Image: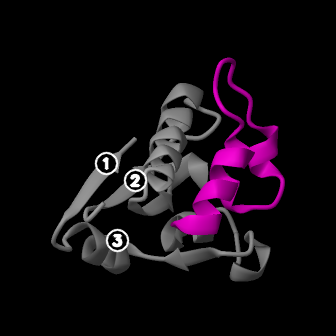
């Protein structure tokens, strides 16, 4: 696959279906061989912390922790800088492989040739 996919998820436990859709689409794209970047913003920011994805439950949905593991293994996962700061999340708090970056990096990713961006 020559295209890249950037998925920005703004929802967490506050909107579980939207949250699960974002993770499912991103993980499915990784499994299909796409270059995938998942951005955790808003309430989804909490999933950058160890154990938080395992706490998420939604009937008939793949476990969020498994989807996140797949994304960390072969994609990129980024926590929004401002979202992290508002929640007092530090670089040392996040799962291995999660980076913290801001709007300039997001814009650079989504404006790259051959990139599709989705926001959930």
**Foreground: 70 or 97?**
70
Q: Which region of the structure is painted magenta?
A: 47-76
The answer to whether 100 is drawn above or below residue 61 in the figure is: below
Residue highlighted by disc 3: 106
- In the picture, residue 83 is in which quadrant? bottom right
Q: Which residue is mark 2?
A: 7
Residue placed most toward the observer, 55 or 116: 116
Quarter placement of the C terminus: top left
Q: Is residue 60 above or below residue 99?
A: above
Pinpoint residue 42: horizontal percent, then vertical percent: 52, 52
Residue, x 52% and y 39% (percent of image)?
24
Q: Is residue 96 magenta?
A: no
Q: Earlier in the sequence, mark 1 or mark 2?
A: 2
* Pointer 1 or 3: first along the chain: 3
Give percent across and percent down for residue 119.
Answer: 34, 46
Residue at the extreme left of the image, as rendered: 113
Task: Please tell me whether residue 50 belongs to the stretch shown in magenta.
Answer: yes
Mark 3 or mark 2: name the one nearer the start of the chain: 2
Estimate the spatial distance between the alpha carbons at disc 3 and disc 2, rounded to whole Å. Answer: 10 Å
Residue at x 42%, y 62% (from the top left corner):
36
Q: Position of residue 74 (x, y in %)?
A: 56, 66
Count of numbered badges drawn on the protein: 3
Name which residue lies at 75% across and 61% down. Answer: 49
Does residue 18 sit above or below 22 in this rendering?
above
The secondary structure type at the circle numbered 3 is helix
Mark 1 neighbour class, 10 Å CA radius: few under 14, some 14 to 19, many 20 or more: some
> Dot 2 surroundings within 10 Å: few (below 14), some, or many (20 or more)?
many
Mark 3 or 2: the one toward you: 2
Whether tag 1 and tag 2 are in contact, CB under 8 A, the answer is yes
Query: Which residue is the site of mark 1?
Result: 118
The residues tagged by marks 1 and 2 sit, at their Cα atoms, a distance apart of 5 Å
């Amino acid at each position: 696959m020559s295209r890249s996919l950037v998925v920005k998820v703004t929802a967490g436990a506050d909107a579980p279906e939207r949250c699960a859709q974002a993770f499912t689409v991103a993980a499915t794209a990784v499994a299909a061989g796409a270059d995938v970047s998942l951005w955790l913003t808003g309430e989804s920011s909490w999933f950058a912390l160890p154990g938080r994805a395992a706490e998420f439950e939604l009937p008939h949905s793949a476990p969020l922790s498994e989807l996140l593991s797949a994304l960390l293994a072969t994609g990129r996962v980024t926590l929004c800088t401002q979202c992290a700061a508002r929640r007092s999340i530090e670089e040392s708090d996040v799962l291995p492989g999660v980076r913290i970056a801001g709007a300039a990096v997001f814009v650079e990713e989504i404006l790259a040739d051959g990139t599709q961006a989705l926001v959930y």
